[in-house]
Each structure stands twice: as C-alpha cells, then as structure tokens.
Amino acid sequence: MTRIAHCCCGSLRAEATGEPAFVGACHCTECQRRTGSPFGVGTLFPKEQVRTEGPSKVYKRGSDSGRKVEIHFCPDCGSSVFWYAELYPDFIGIAFGAFADPSMPSPTVSVWETRRHPWVAFNHQLDRFAVQPEIDDRDLEQLIHGAANDRSSMA
C-alpha cells in the first residue's frame, strides 16, 4: 500500500509505502504551536519507505525533551508535512493530517500528557506518558510493535 501526504497546495509531498511503524499523539507546546491545535498526531515510517518531493523550507528547533527536530514545510502554503527527529534517526515523521486518510491507524501512544488540555480525550485505549519517555532501541521496538505491556520503566 502506498500512502501520500501533502501540504494544502500539493507542492510538498511525502509518499510512504506500507503501514506506519508508529502513530502517536503529542501534547508538547512545540507540537501545539506547529499544528495550531491542542496536540499533534505524527506517524513514523522507516526512511527507506518514504520518498519526498517538492520544495520545502526547513525549520530546525529543539523539542520539549531537548532533542533536535528538523521540520519541512511548504514555502508556498506553510503546511508542515514531514520531519526528522534526533530521537528516531532511522525514521521520518509525517504529519498524520497531511494524509487526510480516514483509514490511517489510530494513535497508540500519547506523550506530554502533562501539557494535554483537560478537555482533550481519546475514545480508545492508548499508552500515556507524562512527558517524552526516555527510550533506547529496545524500548523503541516495543513502542513500534506494541509488544510492551509495562511501560513504567520508560515514564
């Protein structure tokens, strides 16, 4: 399966093959500002499964956890479409809403719950973390593949 994400005007695109390795909701202040919404929803795909095309402007910033993120957005319409995060060096993040696809999988994780607006609620079960969990490669594999039941060591 091929999924195509793009900006509002269609100039900046990300074409991903297969299913996302991970879908998560983030309530950090940076995601709130990036999306103009009370939280952002992002997908992670292995870099080798994504092809990007079109001009982009790059905004490099720190994250609430202190790690670096490089966001690519359309220079014409301003939509952020994809990013590279220091935390996930083998993956490319793609904005969930840029797919505009109701068949996309639901988020399985919610991070930065300490900054979640109190009226935001999800109607399904997901793993919740007060902040961005400190994770190593093993923990990342568990998050991606949903194999971990006890995530207390990552909180």
Image (cartoon, rainbow, N blue to C red):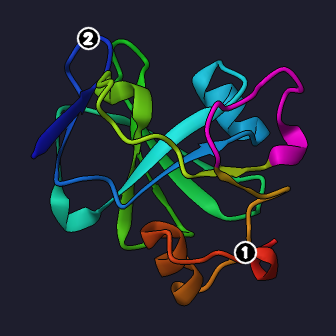
How far apart are the alpha carbons under marks 1 and 2?
40 Å
- Magenta segment: 113-125
Residue 97 position by quadrant: top left
Q: Nearer the viewer, mark 1 or mark 2?
A: 1
- Image quadrant holding the C terminus, namely bottom right
| Horizontal and vertical percent position of residue 65 | 76, 61
Name the amino acid type tagged 1: Arg
How packed is label 1: few (under 14 Cα within 10 Å), some, or many (20 or more)?
A: some
Q: Measuring 77% from the left and 25% from the top, which residue is drawn there? A: 120
Give SS at disc 2: loop
Q: Which residue is mark 2?
A: 9
Q: Residues within 10 Å of mark 2 (few under 14, many from 20)?
A: few
Is 124 inside the magenta-drawn segment?
yes
| Count of numbered marks | 2
Front-most of 64 and 123?
123
**Residue 21 forms part of the magenta stretch:** no
Residue 83 in percent (x, y) is at: 43, 48
Q: Residue at x 79, y 49 (%)?
A: 112
Q: Which mark is residue 151?
A: 1
Q: Is residue 62 visible?
A: no
Q: Which secondary structure lies at badge 1?
A: loop
> Residue drawn at (79%, 82%), measured in percent from left and top?
153
Q: Is residue 34 left or right of residue 100?
A: right
Amino acid type shown at disc 2: Cys
In this rendering, the answer to whether 93 lies above or below 148 is: above
Q: Is residue 7 visible?
A: yes
Q: Residue at x 71, y 39 (%)?
A: 30
